[in-house]
C-alpha cells in the first residue's frame, strides 16, 4: 500500500548532491557558507516574520563543530542574522559583505560606512516619490544602516510596484552616491563600494585557507558568490560546490550559476542535516 508522505516527514535528500557536499567538505580545512532568507528561512510576507528552520540551525551547530568555518552571509544586518540563526559559534557576514559579527564583536567595512551616509535620505526620497505617484501600497522600507531595502512583496501589483520603484531608486542613488541592486521582490540601495557576497566569499576562503567550500543561496545577490567561487575553482584555488535553493520565483541567473539544487528551504535543511550526519559518521 502506498501511503501519501506525511507532512512532517523531512523531504528526501538527493544522494548525488549529498555525496558532492561531503566530498567537498572532506577537503580540510573546509567551510560551509549559507545565505538566510529563502535558503534556511522561508521568505515571509515581511522580513520580521521570517524564521530560520529549526532543523537547519541544529545542523549548522553540528557542522560548526566539524568544519574550519561555518558562516552565514546575508543581506540583512549581521546582528539581525545572528538573532535569526541564534548560534554564537558561527561567523555572520551582513549587509552583503559590508559587516561581520563574530562572538559579539562587529567589524564594518570602512568604505561602506563612509559611503552609506546618504542612505536614510535616499530611502525617504524613494518613499516620498512612491507616495506621490500612488505606488506606495504595500511597500516596506528597511534601513539596515549600511544598505537599505524596499520590499514590494505586499504590493497588490508587484510588477507595477517594481516598475515605479526602479527609476525612483536610481534617481535617489544618483543623488546620494549609492547603487541600486535587486532581489526577490526587493529593490536595494547600497554604498558605491566593491563589496558583495562574492568578495566576502573570496576573503573567507583566503583567511581560513579553505580547500573545500560549499555555498548555499537562492537569490541574485548570491550569484555574486556563485560566480566568485566558480572563478576560484577554475583557478584551482579551492574545491567549491554551489547549491541553489529553488522556489517558484527563483531568478534565472541563479539557475544558471549553480552546481546542484534543492527544491526549497525544508529540503535545504534536510540536506544540511544529512551532511552533518555524513561528517559525523567518519
Ligand atoms: Mg536569500
Image: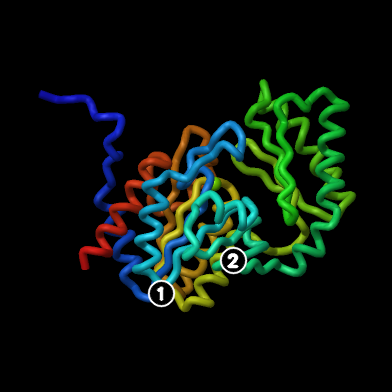
Q: Is mark 1 on a helix, strand or loop?
A: loop
Q: Which mark is residue 211?
A: 1
| Image-based side of 273 in relation to 220, left or right | left
Colour pattern = rainbow
Give the alpha-carbon distance from disc 1 to disc 2, as whole Å. Answer: 27 Å
Rendering coords of residue 23 (x, y %): 29, 65
Q: Nearer the viewer, residue 241 or 277?
A: 277
Where on the picture, by quarter, is residue 94? Answer: bottom right
User: Few, some or many C-alpha atoms within 10 Å of disc 1 (few <14, some 14-19, many ≥20)?
Assistant: many
Which residue in the protein does label 2 denote? 104
Q: Which residue is drawn at 70% across and 44% down?
A: 149
Q: Residue 152 placed where, x, y %?
A: 68, 32
- Residue drawn at point x = 84 percent, y = 57 percent: 117
Sequence-first disc among 1 and 2: 2
Numbered disc in front, either 1 or 2: 2
Camera sees residue 153: yes
Count neighbours of disc 2 (C-alpha within 10 A) and say few if under 14, some if 14 to 19, many if 20 or more.
few
Q: Residue placed farthest to the left in the image?
A: 1
Instruction: Pinpoint residue 180: horizontal percent, then vertical percent.
Output: 74, 48
Quarter of the image that includes the N terminus:
top left
**Residue shown at 14% from the left, 25% from the top:** 2
- Element assignment for label 2: loop
Q: Toward the viewer: 108 or 249? A: 108
Is residue 259 depicted above or below 31 in this figure?
above
Amino acid at each position: 500500500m502506498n501511503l501519501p508522505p506525511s507532512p512532517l516527514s523531512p523531504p528526501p535528500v538527493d544522494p548525488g548532491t549529498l555525496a558532492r557536499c561531503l566530498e567537498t567538505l572532506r577537503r580540510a580545512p573546509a567551510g560551509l557558507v549559507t545565505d538566510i532568507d529563502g535558503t534556511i528561512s522561508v521568505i515571509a510576507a515581511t522580513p520580521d516574520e521570517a524564521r530560520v528552520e529549526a532543523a537547519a540551525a541544529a545542523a549548522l551547530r553540528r557542522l560548526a563543530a566539524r568544519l574550519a568555518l561555518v558562516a552565514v552571509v546575508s543581506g540583512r544586518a549581521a546582528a539581525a542574522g545572528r538573532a535569526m540563526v541564534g548560534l554564537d559559534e558561527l561567523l555572520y557576514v551582513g549587509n552583503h559583505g559590508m559587516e561581520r559579527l563574530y562572538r559579539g564583536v562587529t567589524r564594518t567595512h570602512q568604505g561602506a560606512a563612509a559611503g552609506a551616509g546618504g542612505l536614510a535620505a535616499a530611502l525617504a526620497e524613494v518613499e516620498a516619490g512612491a507616495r506621490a505617484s500612488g505606488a506606495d501600497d504595500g511597500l516596506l522600507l528597511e534601513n539596515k544602516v549600511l544598505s537599505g531595502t524596499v520590499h514590494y512583496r505586499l504590493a497588490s501589483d508587484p510588477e507595477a510596484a517594481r516598475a515605479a520603484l526602479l527609476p525612483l531608486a536610481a534617481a535617489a542613488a544618483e543623488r546620494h552616491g549609492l547603487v541600486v541592486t535587486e532581489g526577490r521582490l526587493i529593490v536595494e540601495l547600497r554604498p558605491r563600494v566593491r563589496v558583495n557576497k562574492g568578495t566576502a566569499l573570496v576573503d573567507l576562503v583566503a583567511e581560513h585557507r579553505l580547500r573545500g567550500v560549499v555555498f548555499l543561496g537562492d537569490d541574485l545577490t548570491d550569484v555574486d558568490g556563485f560566480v566568485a567561487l566558480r572563478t576560484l575553482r577554475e583557478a584551482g584555488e579551492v574545491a567549491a560546490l554551489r547549491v541553489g535553493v529553488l522556489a517558484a520565483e527563483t531568478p534565472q541567473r541563479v539557475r544558471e550559476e549553480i552546481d546542484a539544487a534543492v527544491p526549497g528551504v525544508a529540503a535545504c535543511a534536510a540536506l544540511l542535516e544529512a551532511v552533518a550526519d555524513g561528517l559525523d559518521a567518519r
